[in-house]
Amino acid sequence: MGLEGKVAIVTGAWGMQTIGRANALRLARDGADVIVSDIIRPPDLLGEGEKEAGWEGIHSVAREVEALGRRSKAIVCDLTDPAQIENLIGETVSSMGRLDILVNGARAFQDPPRLGLLELTWSGWDHVYAVTTRGPMITTRLAADQMIKQGGGGTIINMTTMGAKKALLVGIAYASAMAAVNHMTRLAALELAPHGIRVNAVAPGVVATNRFSTEDVRKAKEQGITTPEYRRQWLDQRARDIIPLERVATADDVANVVSFLASEDGSYMVGQIVNVDGGVVMD
């Protein structure tokens, strides 16, 4: 799917085995220049295998994009700070000349991530919403302003979750924040379609990533196994219990759909929330 001459921003691109990295690399392989953005992860929150690999987050991803023959730049941005989001958009345009694709992939969880109504904290709730809902709203607004200014339309893709459509015990703050993003996607799509800007969302299910969780560390210790072993067992159990396709998604499974929506092949897709979950949610 040709994206030659396009410039993309991918937020939430820090992790080595994450959807954000996969999105950035797939867009680059399809021809786009890619700005990658995220916060800086402290060493104690690195994902499985990252410390051993000498992983440098968005800086590593930017080098991978450049190795594919595309331009790239790593821009640190905390989505809770509107000024940093303004800088992200401004630096993208000043360094790349334009902006055609925005992938809102950054998200925040409480830790442990599956906190329910009776366990969550007020500050945790506010942080999840600041990153997961308000942040994409601001990036969408500023990206749309730029796309309208430069002309020629554009595309905005929000990353959500199957838990925003189906009631699952995935954490009430995270799931409800993502449900808000789903409807924000539809409303933005209505408003921006006349400008040639297509807004859609992708709702992954269970994805095999190396995301850090203190809950996983704790449960692994309780069972006397390593954290990676616990994660593999948990993913295998989810595949057997809830996924009709009987396997969890890879990050590339999700990135394939993101690339489709960003390309001309998806040019008639507007306001859609596309499930990539192996059949857990069918609508």
Image (spheres, rainbow, N blue to C red):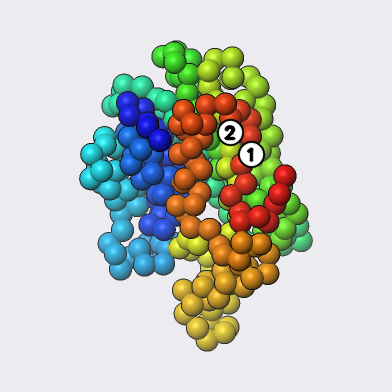
Q: Decide: is 138 above or below 105.
A: above
Position of residue 191 in the picture relative to residue 61 (left or right): right
Q: Which residue is at a point 58% across and 30% down the rendered structure image?
A: 269
Q: Are marks 2 and 1 in contact (CB under 8 Å)?
A: yes
Circle 1 sits on which residue?
273
Q: Identify the amino acid type marked 1.
A: Ile
Position of residue 118 in the picture relative to residue 21 (left or right): right
Q: Which residue is at a point 33% across and 65% down the rendered structure image?
A: 51
Q: Which residue is at a point 57% across and 84% down the rendered structure image?
A: 223
Residue 200 marker: 2
Question: Would you say residue 224 is visible in this rendering?
Answer: yes
Question: Would you say residue 91 is visible in this rendering?
Answer: no
Q: Position of residue 141 (x, y in %)?
A: 54, 24
Q: Which residue is at a point 68% across and 56% down the rendered structure image?
A: 280
Q: Identify the amino acid type marked 2.
A: Asn
Question: What secondary structure is marked by label 2?
Answer: strand
Q: Residues within 10 Å of mark 2 (few under 14, many from 20)?
A: many
Question: What secondary structure is marked by label 1?
Answer: strand
